[in-house]
Image: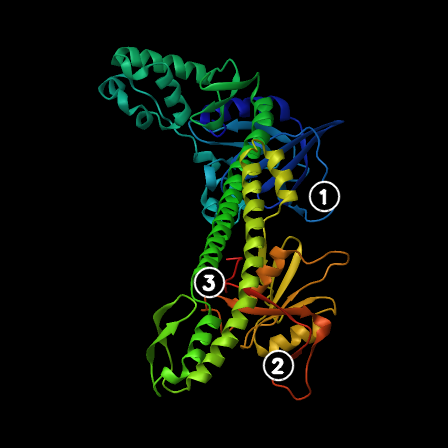
Amino acid sequence: MHQNYYFLRQLARQLDSHLRGYTLQAAFSQEKDELMLAFYKGEEEFYLKAIQTSTFSSLQFPRTFHRAKQNSVDLFPDLLHQQVLEVRAHRQERSFYIRFTQERVLLFKLFGNRSNVVLFVDGEATELFHRKLSKDLELDYRQMDRDVLLDKELFLEQPQNLRKLLPTLGEVPGLYLQEKGYDTLSPEEQWEQVQEMVALLENPTAYYLTYLHKQFRLSLLPVGEIQETWADPISALNAFVPQYRAQEYFQKNYSAVHRQLSKQLDGAQKIWWQIQEQLEKWDHGTPYAQTADIIMANLTNIPPGSKEVELYDFYHDTHRLVSLKSTETPQKTAERLYKKAKNQKIEHRLLEERAARKEQEVTRLSALLQQLESIETAPQLRTFLKQNAPSQAVTQVDLPYHTFELMGFKILVGKNSKANDKLTLKHTHKDDLWLHAKDVPGSHVVIKYQAGKAFPAPVLEAAAQLAAFYSKRRNDSLCPVLYTPKKYVRKAKGAAPGSVIVEREKVLLVKPENPFR
């Protein structure tokens, strides 16, 4: 109800009694959606902060305020040094205005996500706080009063349509009536109950901070789970606004971080399962070396040009079908299988190492998610986010590379062949880690070195995935990626753009993907 007509009516009365005779000393903004007004009267000061974000609009009255030296913009210059003559709320409307000397008026229009502050000079709207709401220049603060009267005869005909008959009530009064058993009463009893409630709204005995239907609210009516009680509207707002914004911050950021961590955990688990399936296939399938041995042992039994032949498998004392290529000799096929077996051993080892790292990542993300789910307050969430900032991706349009960030390490990815040269030759340090998809064209990838810090395994894996993703092997199920310190990468004279010579490289087998998407 902090934007409700009945509340603004009480607030305007208190502001009128307090601000009359004060002079506006400053009007400025140092946050995109916040307007600060500083008033003074002799030695006394009074601050008004209008908060008008896309999701929340309200007023607050801080006791002190220190203006920042930077990023602060002066507003409403025509209003400076003018004295307050009155503060008045519009009838049955969510707005009020402050009237100053020299025909200056500052209108506070509190219409949810269309809230604004409008300056009038000599009756004409001249300046807006939110300039995007340009139609507010057509407003006339003198024509914004609304005469809405609740007629008893009309009410008795349709008591269920109270919100339509008295639209300025808002949501909370309807919930208050429900708690009072409004729906079980006769129309005459409902009328009496509504009259009692309206009298309480017009002359509230207190201002309540309450939880109602899982939302934190400011109410003029004792309803819901009351947390705090205040005697005046200014004190109530000063207590309500920071708590509401803290909860708004909590709900918005908690949901976003929970989604992101859950997505990362699901992705890590999926990759871990895929690696386990691949390892299981290799462990239970026939090794390439065994097939090659069987071919070599049965050379005399293989007809020339065969595509498939049944051979004796001395490993398992049985016969099995062996696929061949009609375009190559059995010896050549066996040679190719022996080479494949050698590579498979390397890939198997790399897969096991990657499975171990992915399992660690799953454990880490599970622990983070569990820690997040135990958080209940905004300060706890801020601390958690500071300590465990989610990975972010940033694109630098004016540079020859894309920039990603994970665990505090920057990962640079070349945009094309010429950009690869610029990245590797001009934007790297000798101790940076350089990566590239093995044996295929693709982007150069660099992890920026940090003094005294080793490259974390999750960062290395993410960079390798990017190298595989931005290469000709992006559609493969697995891609070998070589990596080495930048000092072992050099450009041969006259070599094509992006072409380099690499020494002392190691190989990491990864699934091609962009983990930052």
Horizontal and vertical percent for residue 510? Answer: 53, 63
Question: Is residue 121 shown to the viewer in this render?
Answer: no
Residue at the disc numbered 3: 282
| Up-down relation of residue 414 to residue 94 (above or below) | below
Q: Residue at x 33, y 11 (%)?
A: 192
In the structure shown, which secondary structural element does the residue marked by tag 1 occupy?
Answer: loop
Q: Nearer the viewer, mark 3 or mark 2?
A: 3
Disc 2 to disc 1, C-alpha distance: 51 Å
Amino acid type, mark 1: Ala
Horizontal and vertical percent for residue 132? Answer: 50, 50
Amino acid type, mark 3: Trp
Question: Is residue 324 shown to the viewer in this render?
Answer: yes
* Front residue of 262 and 290: 290
Horizontal and vertical percent for residue 84? Answer: 62, 30
Mark 1 or mark 3, which is nearer the start of the sequence? 1
Binning the other alpha carbons within 10 Å of mark 2 as few (below 14), some (14 to 19) or many (20 upward) gives some
Res 499 label: 2
Do the residues bearing badges 2 and 1 touch, measured as CB atoms within 8 Å? no
Amino acid type, mark 2: Ser
Residue at the disc numbered 1: 68
In the structure shown, which secondary structural element does the residue marked by tag 2 occupy?
Answer: loop
